[in-house]
Amino acid sequence: MINNNKQLVRFIEYSFTQRGIPKHMRNLAIIESNLDKSQISAAGASGIWQFMIGHANDYGLTESNRADMYKSTKAVTNSLINLYNKYKNWVTVVAAYNCGEGNVNKAMQRAGSKNYTDFNSFLPVETQNHVQKYLNACYATGELNAVLQDYYKTSFKVKETTSKPTVDVKKFKENTLKNRAKIDLLETTINGAYRLDVILKYLKVERIQFLKWNPEMEKNLIQKGETILVLPRNLMDIFTINKYKILTESLKK
């Protein structure tokens, strides 16, 4: 898709980098419209950036100009900058662009957290899928690590004591695994395509400890083709943000 729209993609990337927006945000147009300026959604969103009329007007874009690839790109640049200044990471920006700031703010309040991996379950399913599509697109273009590094700059801020953009799993285990009852455990469903060894690789947790949380996991994957994955909140964050990479690597094996 990028190769078939080189001129447009170059314009988008140039417009973004001139304002400090990373090139990977060009993928937002890919998942919004497949870079098709004639795309109109069932809700009435139009153009490559799928502007609703109200959103377009907020940034000086007329209804008819929503299909103008160049004017709409200039308008979306201002929109994305405003969202980033508010939320400080591009993952949350993508969510807010899809469902609106009001829905994101309500989800944050309900979760009591500004981390996307904490509040995403309170967002519309469509928005959760939209963000996953964006992460998938960034993985396909080789830019997922840049997205995650930006995300980790503002995530786990209270729990981390250094600026290193990773969770200190060793310290986490030492402080919390001694008393499982006090750990904030979360659940998600995974299917038989996931391999345990790959999950352990990304979580950096010992197999014995992992199976204490998930004693029936291997049996369920074989017999039922799916299972409930139970993890402490910090490790669930790591799993969620790396979910597509884990699945891809599992399938290769």
Image (cartoon, grey):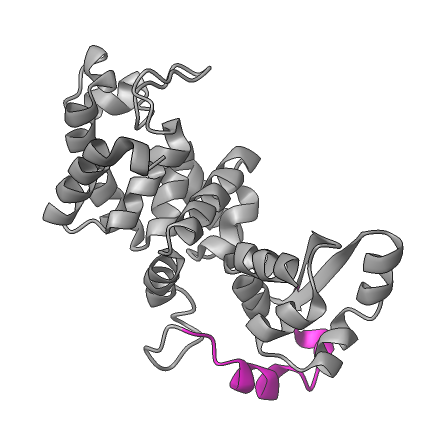
Q: Which sits in the foreground, 196 or 227?
A: 196
Q: Is residue 26 above or below residue 71?
A: below
Magenta segment includes 22: no
Q: Is residue 117 above or below residue 39?
A: below
Instruction: Name the residue rendered at 24%, 18% in the picture.
Output: 66
Where residue 252 sits: x, y (%)? Answer: 62, 60
- Looking at the image, residue 173 sits to the left or right of residue 131; the answer is right
- Looking at the image, residue 123 sits to the left or right of residue 46; the answer is right
Magenta range is 166-185
Instruction: Name the residue rendered at 75%, 55% in the picture.
Output: 192
Tell me if residue 78 can be seen: no
Q: Quadrant of residue 205?
A: bottom right
Residue furthest to the front in view is: 3
Q: Is residue 220 above or below residue 141?
A: below
Residue furthest to the left in view is: 18
Where residue 22 sits: x, y (%)? Answer: 23, 51
